[in-house]
Amino acid sequence: MSKSFKLVEPRGAEAAPSTSAQPAPETDWPLCFICQETTPESLTSPSQNTRQDKGSSYSILAGHLRRFNELGLLPNSFLLSRLDEGSGVEAALSANNARYHKTCRLRYNKTKLDRAEKRHLKIGADEEEEVVDRKRTRYLSRPSSTETKHQEVKCFFCGEAPGSAGLHEAATFQLDSRVRSCALIMDDMDLLTQLNVGDMVAQEAKYHRNCLLNLYNRAR
Ligand SMILES: [Zn+2]
Ligand SMILES: [Zn+2]
């Protein structure tokens, strides 16, 4: 493993007095570029793994950070602009062989981002609904969200609407256990997954009689 070849420029102030952190507009690249703190945790960088990865690791990370920033989820002490030295965040990360603590990096990974996005979307949607409520439906009845929530009754087996045949409701545990054994015999993962939710009676499963008979026949 070759060590990073980039020389670290001495910053002069070796024994800089530890004044209470003035949010530095510049990044101290030899430190963790995320937290800018010295902790016992060792620093890592993509370039220490495979050289090829380096660019893409940085650009993925930069992308995540940008999203976090847009969502307003970066800590106040972490100014994304501090990482941009004129040609974009990933360029600066790459040029400086940016190092980071694994734990700091993990705070901004894909999973965390997805979760944050989801929360954000949810909050966004709620806010919007509230605004609409206030503006337009103050004296009207609430816009019926039941319409979208309304679940059409569908056949447990084929997922289709009742149609002219109509649907029967699963009323006995015998039915459930017979369906279950058919599903096992045929190794029907979809059906088994549905059955995993609970027994058909509890799920108030409805079905086309033909679909049930088909199942029985196929499992024979
Ligand atoms: Zn850190
Ligand atoms: Zn059906």
Image (cartoon, grey):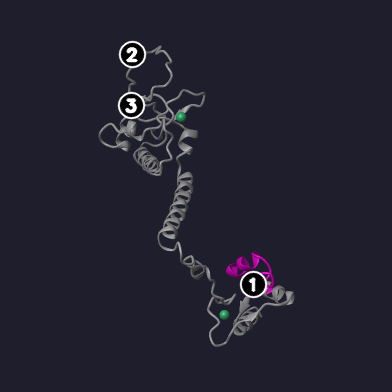
From the image, tell me which residue sits under label 2: 12
Q: Residues within 10 Å of mark 1 (few under 14, many from 20)?
A: many
Give amino acid for label 1: Ala
For label 2, being within 8 Å of ligand 1 is answered no
Which amino acid, by three-letter code, is at mark 2? Gly
**Residue 114 sits above or below residue 197 on the image:** above
Magenta stretch bounds: 181-205
Q: Residue 92: horizontal and vertical position, in percent?
A: 31, 33
Q: Amino acid at mark 3?
A: Pro
Give the numbered dot on residue 183: 1
Placement of 46 over or under 196, stated as above or below: above
Q: Residue at x 46, y 51 (%)?
A: 123
Any atom of ligand 1 within 8 Å of the CB at mark 3? no
The disc, 3 or 2, on the residue closer to the chain's N-terminal end is 2
Taking the spot 35% from the left edge, 30% from the top edge, the residue there is 97
- Which label sits in the foreground, 2 or 1? 2
Q: Which quadrant would residue 52 be assigned to in this image?
A: top left
Check residue 131 for magenta coloring: no
Q: Could you tell me which secondary element the residue under label 1 belongs to? A: helix
Q: Nearer the viewer, residue 47 or 134?
A: 134
Residue 43's spot in the image, x, y percent?
45, 28
Does 188 appear in magenta?
yes
**Mark closest to the chain's N terminus, 1 or 3:** 3
Location of mark 3 (residue): 25
Dot 1 beta carbon under 8 Å from ligand 2: no
